[in-house]
Amino acid sequence: MRQIVLDTETTGLEVGKGHRLIEIGCVELAERRRTGRTFHRYLNPQRAIDEGARAVTGISDDFLLDKPLFASIAEDFLAFVADAELVIHNAAFDLSFIDSELALAGLGERRLGGRAPVLDTLELAREKYPGQKNSLDALCKRLDVDNAHRELHGALLDAELLADVYLAMTAGQGDLGLTAVVARAQIRIVRPGARASLRVLAASLDEIAAHAARLASIDAASKGRCRWQLQ
């Protein structure tokens, strides 16, 4: 499973008022592990940055003057995120800006919103920690992710922190405890045309009880979504 943890910085909060991307950062995960591959670009937005955005990111208008336009890096970005699930905190915000930039670059038909699979970690956190603060900083503190070096917002830095937060928040979901069972199973290969002599073994009462307990545990962990429960 390939995932891209993504974050952006912008000139302001409202894409409908003409605000643009100024930074995009991505971290690649494969099978819930960092691969070491990242995508990071600063971008020339061709407009001034709002004072609030400058204060949060520390990025100045002058710093971005010699940076590339989004249109010139769009294909590289799309290639990096292709065929991956996107992991984004408050996904609607970032995707609205990315899709706006794709449209301005003449690539509106390749927008990500509604096309790419997206996991919104803000929605995940709200479900997991209802009634609590679920900002990236709050989640770092709650999940013991070290963010002491985060003095300002930055797309790549925040994507790296979000990757750690996401993995901590979903720890254990990648393994339902079945690996050891599969490892102990003995697989017999039957050649085409050969007739297999099969023994049918009925489960013991202890095995049935252990199976029921395992399903109950999965059902509790998934908040009633276990599809293997017997009716």
Image (tube, rainbow, N blue to C red):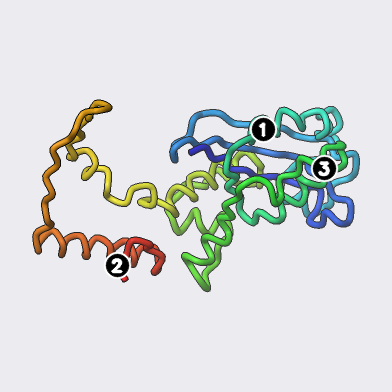
Residue under the point 46% across and 49% down:
145
182 relative position to 86: left or right:
left
Residue 108 shows which numbered tag?
3
Residue 75 location (% of width, % of height): 75, 29
**Element type at marker 3?**
helix
**Element type at marker 2?**
loop
- Label 3–label 1 contact, CB within 8 A: no
Crowd tier of the residue under label 1, counting other residues whose Cα lies within 10 Å: few below 14, some 14–19, many 20 or above: some
Residue 40 shows which numbered tag?
1
Residue under the point 71% across and 45% down:
112
- In the foreground, 106 or 149: 106
Lower position in the chain sequence, tag 3 or tag 1: 1
Q: Dot 2 corresponds to which residue?
A: 230
- Label 1–label 2 contact, CB within 8 A: no
Residue 190 location (% of width, % of height): 22, 30
**Type of residue at label 1?**
His
Residue under the point 21% across and 29% down:
194
